[in-house]
Amino acid sequence: MSAIPATLTEDELRRLKAPARRERWFRLASYFSPLLLLLLWELSSQLNLIDRRFFPAPSTIAETAWRMVLSFELFDHIGATLRRVGVGYAMGAVPGIVMGLILGLSRPTRRVLGPIFSALYPVPKIAILPLILLIFGVGDASKFVVIAIGVFFLMLYNTMSGVMQTPQIYMDVAKNAGASRLQTFRRIAFPAALPSIFTGLKLAAGSSYIIIAAAEFLGARSGVGFFIWASWQTFAVSRMFVGIVVISAMGYLTILALEALERRFVPWAKH
């Protein structure tokens, strides 16, 4: 049997380090890809390849945003939107995860309640906003509810899918070992569903910003969505794009934060 070398050669070390180096470059590229899009937009605007009336240069949008930052106007709208998204997101995510775990673990419950959720899920959440406004008024409560409804279904189906995809052999081993339902849930079902739960959390985060923007169009006097709508009404295109960029950045940063949490709590999942 050939002896194993005590030390690696320089070429072998370089080959071992190559995957980690590529991973760092890919991660860096994912962070800066939005900046590349802005650069292409700026060049197209400066070269008159796009109509500046409808697509002002990012530099013009940045100047408008800076003036709004100095006046603190932008922070007021961001704060209002974040508060609504945060509360509505929590209101929908927690019960969605719990119900998804219950339906994933219990076939009878899934057969009884599954058709009800399947019938309600396709209903556009913005379509029921007028009804929600009638019930909860035009204040923040209606915004919380409409976001919570959208988040709930995404978390329900992603969590349920994660539990149902758990290999049956794990459940059988737990049952043969005398594990209780709570132990099976804590040790097997919930960890197995975590990758799907985080997928749902990221999808729900994006949907939350979509829903709140539309909700603030119709029934708000503050928030980024209201700001975008008010800018459109006065044809303040650069201000409108400030709102669009801001809500895009808010969603992007939220998803980055959730991905960081996923790497921390679900290290076995593929990222």
Image: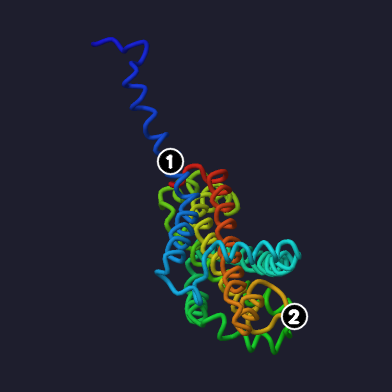
Residue occupying the point 42% across, 57% down = 165
Q: Could you tell me which quadrant the N terminus lies in?
A: top left
Q: Nearer the viewer, residue 237 or 126?
A: 237
Is residue 75 visible from the viewing direction of this image? yes
Residue that badge 1 annotates: 25
- Lower sequence index among marks 1 and 2: 1
> How many numbered marks are there?
2
Secondary structure of residue under mark 1: helix
Secondary structure beneath label 2:
loop
**Measured Cα–Cα span from mark 1 to mark 2:** 46 Å
Kindly tell me whether residue 178 is visible in this rendering: no
* Residue depicted at 51% across the width and 66% down the height: 57
What's the mark number on residue 139?
2
**Of tags 1 and 2, which is closer to the observer?**
1
- Packing grade of label 1 (10 A; few <14, some 14-19, many >=20) is few
* Most distant residue in the left direction: 1
For the residue marked with disc 1, what is the amino acid? Trp
At a point 28% along the width and 10% down the height, the residue shown is 3
Quarter of image, res 68: bottom right
Residue 145 position within the rendered picture, expressed as x and y whole percent measured from the top left:
66, 76
Task: Tell me: 5 left or right of 142.
Answer: left
- Coordinates of residue 110 in the picture (x, y in percent): 49, 70
146 shown above or below 14: below
Query: Residue 135: x, y in percent?
Result: 71, 87
- Mark 2 residue type: Gly
Residue 167: give x, y in percent of width and height: 41, 51
Residue farthest to the front? 47
> Which quadrant holds residue 125?
bottom right
Number of other residues with Cα within 10 Å of mark 2, as a class: few under 14, some 14 to 19, many 20 or more: few
Q: Going by the image, does 29 lie left or right of 249?
A: left
Find residue 173 and report its image quarter: top left
What label does residue 232 carry, if any? none
